[in-house]
Image (spheres, helix red, strand yellow):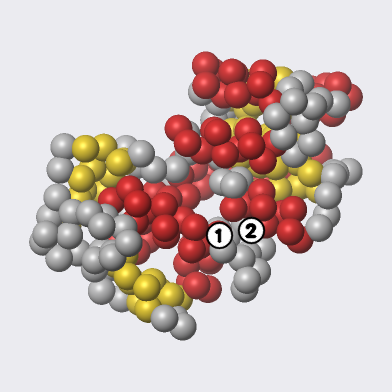
Amino acid sequence: MPNAKILVVDDDPDILAILRDNLELDGYRVLTADSGKAGLELASGEKPDLVILDVMLPDVDGIQVCRVIRKTSEVPIVMLTAKDRVTDKVLGLESGADDYVVKPFDYLELAARVNACLRRGKASFPLRETLVFGALSIDPDTRSAVVGARKVPLTRKEFDLLTLLARHEGRVLDRAQIKKAVWPEAKLYEWSRTIDMHIRNLRTKIEKSPETPRCILTVPGVGYMFHAPADAF
């Protein structure tokens, strides 16, 4: 996606310079920040199309920055981390990151992941018709969900997950199917709670009683199913 705006947040000036120069050569507009606070200010004010975010920052660590961004934005986030432990990768994904790259990294690999995230952000689902279930409307064109007159604030992955389940109303989707459709780029291990956390967030945002869900149902030992009775919302 030439001309997309990318925010790079890293406290290493050499990495900032290398990424800025290479990304600009690839046709991107690049913003840089050397701290978590500066990154949050640019993410809020500049509305980038993608964020490349280092985990180890001097003030606010990248995990916290990712969580703050995810409260208000579905912008794709690629984490940079010097840690190659599985737990660190899972923590980044569960905080809302879309992908991660371990330092030291090859720029061509990072560029490929950036391109993939930008493509998914623009075309996560090829079918574009609005899905309506009583008071709940899901619009793929605007990537928005509305319950009654209330717009539901969803992250990109939450929207993708809700749309996937809604398109298969009445059908049980197992964890492997959900992972393949919503997190194709990530290595989600069997014990990861990423899917469960996103299901919980969706229930909190759209169900009348999240503790006793009637719309997004758990099928023990299998996965999840979308069910939309008329009075569910």
Q: Quadrant of the C terminus?
A: bottom left
Q: Earlier in the sequence, mark 2 or mark 1?
A: 2
Left or right: where 33 falls relative to 105: left
State the residue at coordinates (85%, 26%): 12
| Of residues 98 and 22, the one drawn nearer to the viewer in this rendering | 98
Q: Which residue is mark 1?
A: 194
User: Mark 1: which amino acid?
Assistant: Thr
Marks 2 & 1, CB-CB < 8 Å contact: yes
Residue 182 vertical placement versus 75 (above, below) = below
Left or right: where 148 falls relative to 26: left
Q: Which residue is mark 2?
A: 186
| Of residues 150 and 123, the one drawn nearer to the viewer in this rendering | 150
* Visible residue check, residue 25: no
Q: Secondary structure at mark 1?
A: helix
Q: Locate residue 1, reporting x and y percent.
A: 57, 34
| Of residues 55 and 64, the one drawn nearer to the viewer in this rendering | 64
Left or right: where 95 falls relative to 222: right
Which quadrant holds residue 22?
top right
State the residue at coordinates (69%, 26%): 36
State the residue at coordinates (81%, 39%): 107
User: Mark 2: which amino acid?
Assistant: Ala
* Visible residue check, residue 85: yes
Q: Locate residue 163, reporting x and y percent.
A: 34, 56
